Amino acid sequence: MNLPLYSSTADISRPNLVGLQHPGLAALPTQLVCPLRKNLSLTPLRVKIRWGGDDYVVACDLLRPVNTTALKRVGELDSTASAEILRTFQLLLAGDD
């Protein structure tokens, strides 16, 4: 699965959000997204990725719903980066430890 990249600003030349929601739920009025920035601190709950020749940090710890009408899809991540983001996000979920 390749995670979608969105822009919620007028500048659609670069993404500022990564979608984590299953594509089968695309009809919902909101999408679950994580912020994507160049200047975020890297922590155990954040993932550094490369897209469009630039390095970004995905803040998996700041997942939130955003109204679908505010999102413009600007691309997608490769499967390796997507899998790393999903693995990191799972660290936030309760488990059977």
Image (cartoon, grey):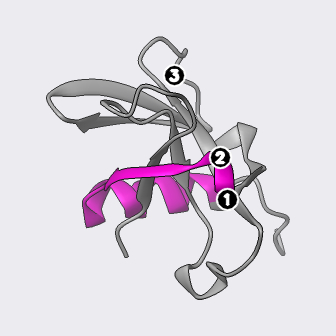
Counting from the top left corner in percent of width and height, residue 43 is at 58, 26
Which residue: 67% across, 59% down?
68
- Could you tell me if the residues under marks 1 and 2 are in contact, i.e. CB atoms within 8 Å? yes
- Could you tell me if the residues under marks 3 and 2 are in contact, i.e. CB atoms within 8 Å? no
Residue position marked by numbered label 2 in the rendering: 70
At label 2, the amino acid type is Ala
Which residue: 30% across, 30% down?
13
Element type at marker 2? helix
Crowd class of label 1 (few under 14; some 14 to 19; many from 20; radius 10 Å): some
> Gap between marks 3 and 2, in whole Å?
27 Å
Counting from the top left corner in percent of width and height, residue 46 is at 55, 35
Residue position marked by numbered label 3 in the rendering: 42
In the rendered structure, the answer to whether residue 10 lies left or right of residue 1 reads right
At label 1, the amino acid type is Thr
Counting from the top left corner in percent of width and height, residue 30 is at 75, 63
- Could you tell me if the residues under marks 3 and 1 are in contact, i.e. CB atoms within 8 Å? no
Was residue 87 drawn as part of the magenta stretch in this picture? yes
Circle nearer the N terminus (3, 1): 3
> Gap between marks 1 and 2, in whole Å?
5 Å
User: The magenta stretch spans which residues?
Assistant: 69-89
Residue position marked by numbered label 1 in the rendering: 68
Q: Nearer the viewer, residue 88 or 51?
A: 51
